[in-house]
Image (cartoon, grey):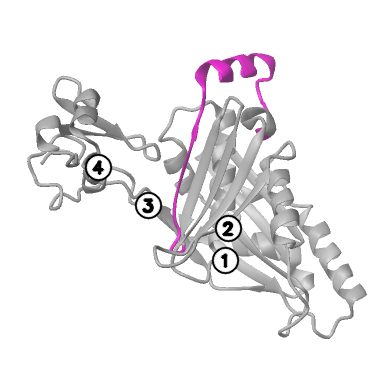
Amino acid sequence: MSSPTEPSATPAFLNHDRPPVPDLVVPRGVLPFHLHQRPVRGRLIRLGPLADALLTRHDNDPSVTMLVGQALALTAGLAAALKFRGSFSLQAKGDGAVPMLLADCTDSGALRGYARADGDRLAALLAEDPAPSAAALLGQGYLAFTCDQGPDMERYQGIVAIEGESLTQMTGAYFRSSEQIATHVHLACAQTPAGWRAAALILERVAGAGGIGQDMDTAAQDDAWRTAVALAATLTDAELLDDALTGERLLHRLFHAEGLAVDRARALSYGCRCSRARLAGVLGGFGAEDLDHMAEEGTITMTCEFCNIGFRFERAEISGAVER
């Protein structure tokens, strides 16, 4: 078969073809670290060329692309803390020009995301402000942070109202209300000469136990946390997105005097999980009347919202659900 997106006579259960998307892995996409004997741990996330591969699947306005890039970097960083097989997702639903924003990442680093924009409302917003904030794009609504531990485990989900102008501020509201963990988050996404880049720095304050800050009294732990946040606040977007500046060098610049210890790096990869077989299974759940309505000139086209590739199925090949 010349293309997995074209109609095929191969039975769905034998046809697992993936679309022609990048087979791209960033080996050191996430750098976990901690500060020795201080109640601080963190993760540096840098998508590198993976950001460009993910973000250019859709022809969005740069303001929307930046929002998706920040969401991808944030989600990759939060997924890196998973202690089980599963995935972590961020979903924003609002009443603004971008009513839907979604990013998810598996425990192995497979990353994907997209935003659904209302063209007319976005054009009107951009006419007023060429560089709208995340709050202006999303409008009023909520953020949902979801840990999916697989089919045999209950999902954990935290939902908070959209509060703040930036995705960084919105995330801070989530941690304060749902996780009750002191955090510092820096998100960045921009189009560089090398293409789109996205990155994040996440700091978390951990309890002074288990060998982390256990020899420090509460006042000293407070001071250590404030110092780490103050140093992290000196980081610029340009540094965070600079391919020529390695993650280890960047962290050394920030925290070398604070007992920096870099842990084992984790890979990130292009993570869209669509396939002809998966989508054929979805179609098979519809009744014959619905399938007939979907078909145009005998062909049903299903487009993956993540990778923006259309899969075409001959209507005659899809039997549909048996109606009782």
Q: Secondary structure at mark 2?
A: helix
Can residue 251 be seen at all in this image of the molecule? yes
Which amino acid type is shown beneath numbered disc 2? Answer: Gly
* Circles 4, 1 touching at the beta carbon (< 8 Å): no
* Circles 1, 2 touching at the beta carbon (< 8 Å): yes
Reading the chain from its start, which is encountered first: label 2 or label 4? 2
Residue bearing the label numbered 3: 24
Where is residue 174 shown, x and y percent of the image? 69, 51
Judge the density around disc 2: few (<14), some (14-19), many (≥20) Cα neighbours within 10 Å. many
Does the magenta portion include 252? no
Residue bearing the label numbered 1: 81
Instruction: Identify the residue shown where x is 54% and y is 73%.
Output: 264
Where is residue 67 shown, x and y percent of the image? 59, 37
Question: In this view, which residue lies farthest toward the left?
Answer: 9
Start-end of magenta stretch: 107-134
Residue bearing the label numbered 2: 77
Q: Is residue 220 left or right of residue 119?
A: right
Instruction: Identify the residue shown where x is 15% and y is 52%.
Output: 13
Reading the chain from its start, which is encountered first: label 1 or label 3? 3
Q: Is residue 49 left or right of residue 131?
A: left
Circle 3 or circle 2, nearest the eye: 2
323 or 319: nearer the viewer: 323
Residue bearing the label numbered 4: 285
